[in-house]
Image (spheres, rainbow, N blue to C red):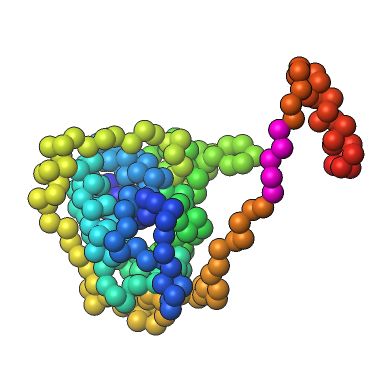
Amino acid sequence: MNIVVCLKQVPDTTDVKIDPETHTLIREGIPSIINPVDMYAIEEAIRLKERFGGRVTAMTLGPPQSLKALTEAVAMGVDEAIQLCDRAFAGSDSWATSYTLALAIRKLGEFDLVLCGKQAIDGDTGQVGPGIASQLDIAQLTYVFKIVSLDPEARLITVERLLEEGREIVAASLPALLTVVKDINQPRSASLFQIREASKRGITIWTAADLPGADPSMLGLKGSPTQVIQIFSPPARTGAVEFIEAGTVRESAAILAERIIAEKIL
């Protein structure tokens, strides 16, 4: 089994800054972590490798500091890590990100599965996984809660999807892309020894020039159809809190009921 995991490094803070010219998030120099849901995709990929054999490759598109996320993935048990890092990729929206990651996956050669978290906590779009599947022209199985069965020889996978209205079991031919939810497993924690060993491993870095067939007009901010026109902070909430003081809870409830009726709230 050749499995690719696409992960993203996201800010580990709510104190983020926006570039005034490009209207994109400034990621350099702020505390960052692996997107939480992507941890479950990494774990599931490693479990599949342990069960069926093969190789797991982790991949991310991001600034130089995203090497830390890939090192953590290697410490967990990923075999190879590839960072897509180039100024040409800066400002990529979900479309341009999907296009770039798909090019990198094609460069890897034959693969059986691509795993992603269902969405990132910063952009929160849930579009990159399905976008990669569309670019690669492979089946996409989203919101995967459980891999029911996987037959590498028959090239068939069956999964259970966790939907708002219930659960759904679907099957698809390999290769396929899965976006997973956090209910699928419990990610392992890397030991200090594993983290130290992973930090000694080299991380492969690919630039735009390393991606065969890459169209410069489809990369980065230039290739992003999503454009941010204006950014602003919502006005601070106003209002006051009034405490109802009474001798008993029943008296407080009676006063509150009278106030609600008087204010015509009900």
Specify whether residue 80 is painted magenta.
no
**Marker count (numbered):** 0
Front in this rendered view, residue 61 or 58:
61
| For residue 40, above or below residue 80 | above
The location of residue 189, given as percent across then percent down, is: 26, 35
Residue 155, can we see it? no
The location of residue 250, given as percent across then percent down, is: 80, 18
The span shown in magenta is: 239-243
The residue that appears at 35% across and 80% down in the rendered structure is 215
The residue that appears at 74% across and 30% down in the rendered structure is 244
| Quadrant position of residue 230 | bottom right
The residue that appears at 41% across and 64% down in the rendered structure is 17
The location of residue 77, given as percent across then percent down, is: 21, 42
View extreme (bottom): residue: 217
| For residue 250, above or below residue 242 | above
Residue 246, can we see it? yes
| Quadrant position of residue 135 | bottom left
In the image, taking residue 217 as reference, residue 213 lies left or right, namely left
| Quadrant position of residue 27 | bottom left
The location of residue 46, given as percent across then percent down, is: 28, 41
In the image, taking residue 84 as reference, residue 93 lies left or right, namely right
Q: Which quadrant holds the C terminus? A: top right
In the image, taking residue 177 as reference, residue 200 lies left or right, namely left
The residue that appears at 76% across and 17% down in the rendered structure is 248
The secondary structure making up most of the magenta span is: loop
| For residue 53, above or below residue 255 | below
Front in this rendered view, residue 182 or 163:
182
